[in-house]
Image (tube, rainbow, N blue to C red):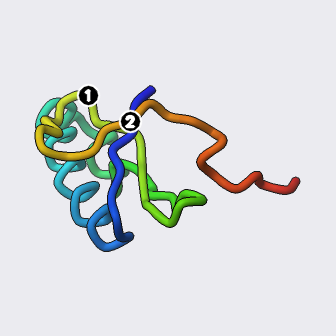
Amino acid sequence: MQEVVFNTEAEAEAQQALDLVCHLAHHNDEPYASQTTRWAEPRERLDGKWAYPCCEHQDYSGMTVEDYDPNNYPTEEV
């Protein structure tokens, strides 16, 4: 899996909103479209950058795209 990486949470949130529009353009069936409010939840990485999984329908030319690495994120305690 690849993820798109941003310097700030605001940048990540703005792009994920665009990704949702792009995704729904390809998958705009009810009730899915009416229940889907986000493409992805941006998460902060240990390096302070923000990332989320890439949308398969979006063109990320000019953006930073990296392979997902769980070591980039804090471990979650259960």
**Position of the N terminus by quadrant:** top left
Q: Residue type at mark 2: give it.
A: Glu
- Residue at 21% x, 32% y is 27
In the picture, the disc for residue 56 is: 1
For residue 41, what is the image quadrant? bottom left
Q: Measured from the top left, where is residue 8 in percent x and y?
A: 35, 70
Residue drawn at (51%, 58%) of the image: 43
Residue 40 x %, y %: 40, 50
Callout 1, which amino acid? Answer: Glu
Looking at the image, residue 25 sits to the left or right of residue 48; the answer is: left
Distance CA(mark 2)–CA(mark 1): 14 Å
Q: Residue at x 57, y 36 (%)?
A: 69
Q: Nearer the viewer, residue 33 or 4?
A: 4
Which of the two labelled residues, at mark 2 and mark 1, occupies the earlier sequence position?
A: 1
Closer to the camera, 47 or 50? 47
The residue tagged 2 is: 66
Q: Secondary structure at mark 2?
A: strand
Helix, strand or loop at label 1? It is loop
Few, some or many C-alpha atoms within 10 Å of disc 2 (few <14, some 14-19, many ≥20)? some
Q: Quadrant of residue 77?
A: bottom right
Q: Is residue 8 above or below residue 57?
A: below
Counting the numbered discs, the total is 2
Q: Which one is closest to the eye, mark 2 or mark 1?
A: 2
